[in-house]
Image: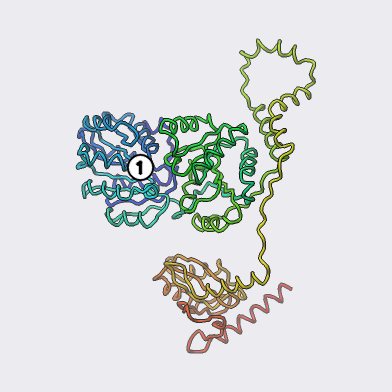
Amino acid sequence: MAIMEMGFESPMPVQERVIPHLLHEDGDVVALAQTGTGKTAAFGLPVIQRTDTSLRQPQALIISPTRELCLQIGGDLADFSKYTKDLKVLPVYGGSSIESQIRSLRQGVHIIVATPGRLLDLINRGVVNLSAVHTVILDEADEMLNMGFLDDINAILENVPEERKMLLFSATMPDEIAKIAKNYMHNPQEFVIGTRNEGAQNVKHVYYMVNAKDKYLALKRIADSNPNIYGIIFCRTRRDTQEIADNLIADGYNVDALHGDLSQMQRDTVMKKFRERTLQLLVATDVAARGLDVDSLTHVINYGLPDDPATYTHRSGRTGRAGKTGVSIAIIHSREKSKLREIEKKIQKEFEKGTVPTPQRIIEKQLYNLADRIERVKVNEEEIEKYLPGIVRKLEWLSENDLLKRIVSLEFNRLLDYYKDAPEVIDYEEKKPKKAEKNAKTAQRADKDRRVAEKGFERVYVNAGKADGFYPARLIDTLNQNMDGRVEIGRIDLFNNYALFDVRKGEGRKAVAALKNARYFGKRLYSEIADPNRDYEHASERKSNSKGKRKDDDDNFSKFKKRKNKKSK
């Protein structure tokens, strides 16, 4: 009944996978899913169902990286268990009175939601008994590792029973997460919601490349061109965060800063205002924004890119939640382009190149937004009727057109004045390399591609290339048609008469067997595990088998191409 009251109608993908497993199956779970995908309900609902309220001891332990997330999970569990009699949920976190938390523990609780540091403190004091815990959940495990909680997590897990069910939720899968799974989990089943380490599906990724001195001007124009923006601006340092927030406030925005120099009370006040939409934009560091969970963000703006691509994944995952669409924007200068490419590879999506909006475009969008607001405004006919006669008498000398102009000017004079003499913001155009330099880099890359497979992969050679029309889609189709099951394909390098491609280590022979003696438009294919020391430029001339059928096949293929070209002419 509580679930129905909260508006749940159908389960989200992570809930469909995790809830049945937690209720009915043995073994632990590693769930790779972005923030905002319904994880709390995925583990919270079955944990509540599996809790025995007659036993006044902690039976489930949920560990989260921040105070804010701890409180949020605790609040969600309280909502889920609204009609579960006598269930006690206790959030345990730093920055609050440890004495009151100890009193609550002694009175008896069933589910503990804790930050690692405070929970370890309570364990060391001997005031929390975890002997009856049957379920342990690590939420946003990669965030906890980024914050340096690995040793605390290891110490906590040493204090829970060996026979327990364990769930680990993470947006990304760094090596440390894999080690925790190996050391503390029993036959863990991995659920990947989406694709491993990819960005949220409903998020569009856009970058603006400008000169470093123009980054703030670009930021303001992007914000001005999105009148209904509700988002977070991420900065690298506390100083940048406060400076940008101060500038935006001076320029008339409802903005505040969130960083490590604020007291807990100041942080709580800022986040309350942001959740209530009193603030339109929040300028924050990554550390300060951890645990801030808001479902309706329209934009995430990266005022420069983070060093770790996984951090970008977390940032962008804060928008595009709960089935809504969102935009993740990166404002960068030319030296950050390589970081952008690393992130694209990580999230498996390409960034669109944006053009900084012109003043004319911004004013146009703001005017149309005002017209929409006027059109949609709710009119309280009964209350306003008694004031209308006096207003009409005062303004009756104005024509409809004059009245409309004055309403618009009342809203827009400040914006018009600001952009009247606004400096030009030039989009940085990437310089194309000189032809000789480009050719040298291409040759160097081709030479490398002939020899080196990506880490964890092995290279496979096949004797068909661009001249044969053997492009990546054709290669994949040919493999699928001639193979039982699937192999994971990595980088594909196409050359004129041959191709090299990567498959996971151990799957090379499977790919070779699928391609060997297969036919592509009459041509018999030959494949082998690529030799990193061999030059394959003339490999297409090699016979595919001892019977010497290769030449006949190639002749047939040449005739086929001639007939095809003749028809097209």
Closer-to-camera residue (245/508):
245
Location of residue 567 by image quarter: bottom right
Q: Position of residue 553 (x, y in %)?
A: 57, 83
Residue visible at 57% across and 47% down in the picture:
329
486 left or right of 109?
right
Residue 444 visible within the image: yes
Rendered view: 94 above or below 188: above
Q: Residue tagged by mark 1?
A: 64
- The answer, for residue 325, to whether it is visible in the render is no
Q: Is residue 209 above or below residue 389?
A: below
Q: Nearer the viewer, residue 42 or 91?
A: 91
- Please state the horizontal and vertical placement of residue 393, each as a whole percent of the image: 75, 11
- Under mark 1, the amino acid is Ser
- Quadrant where the C terminus lies? bottom right
Quadrant of the frame with the N terminus: top left
The image shows residue 322 at horizontal and vertical percentages of 48, 40
In the displayed structure, does residue 324 sit left or right of residue 362? left
Q: Secondary structure at mark 1?
A: loop
Q: How many marks?
A: 1
Give how far across and how far down residue 377 sits, in percent: 63, 25
